[in-house]
Amino acid sequence: MNVDLLLYKAIKNSKIDLILSLPCIMLKGLLQLIEERNEIDHISITREEEGVGIAAGAYLGGKVPAILMQNSGLGNSVNAITSLLQLYEIPVIFIMSHRGAEGEKIQAQIPMGKLTPDLLDLLKIETFIVDSERNIKHIQTAVEQSLSSGIQTCILLKRKLWGSS
């Protein structure tokens, strides 16, 4: 089974019922499945912090939201994460492609790629690394932990999950 389909099924089975997304080449196949299947509500957003606000409102309205983004947008979201999600203990799941790490060809992605794990740690966002098909099961754990404790979690999708592409 292809990785994007495995990710899609894990997300769908995890109780996430709203995806907010930004474009990313690594997430292209997954985003295409979300659109084609039309089983999970999906909103395309233009900036990551916009997604944080929409996710907070959606959670307060009874949804289980996730933001599908690349890690380079984490810096755009810091204030919204700390002054909204963390202050009010709103559980939002970040499903994040890890650009700028191993195999990255675009130099501009590398600085944030190196900083991402430390920034997530500094923000006290529990991070689940998904670097192989067998680790896709972490999605369920991340969602359960987020919902049960009112914290944000991050599912960090490594490039090698998709092979050498």
Image (spheres, helix red, strand yellow):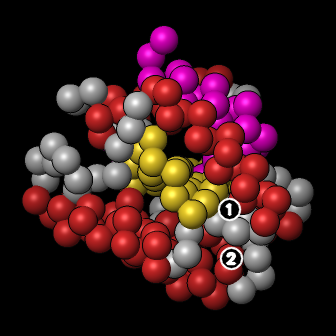
Q: Amino acid at mark 1?
A: Val
Tell me if label 1 and label 2 are in contact, CB under 8 Å: yes
Q: Position of residue 21 (x, y in %)?
A: 53, 51
Q: Relative to the observer, which residue lies in front, 18 or 86? A: 86
Looking at marks 1 and 2 on the same chain, the residue that comes earlier in the sequence is marked by: 2
Is residue 54 shown to the viewer in this render?
no
Instruction: Specify the amino acid type for callout 2.
Output: Leu
The residue under the point 55% across, 75% down is 124
Q: Nearer the viewer, residue 150 or 45?
A: 150
Q: Quickly name the residue at label 2.
A: 85
The residue segment tinted magenta is: 1-25
- Separation of disc 1 and disc 2 at Cα? 8 Å
**For residue 143, side relative to residue 135 (left or right):** right
Residue 45 pos. (x, y %): 54, 58
Identified at 35% across, 66% down, the residue is 116
Label 2 sits on a secondary structure element that is helix
Say which residue label 1 marks. Answer: 92
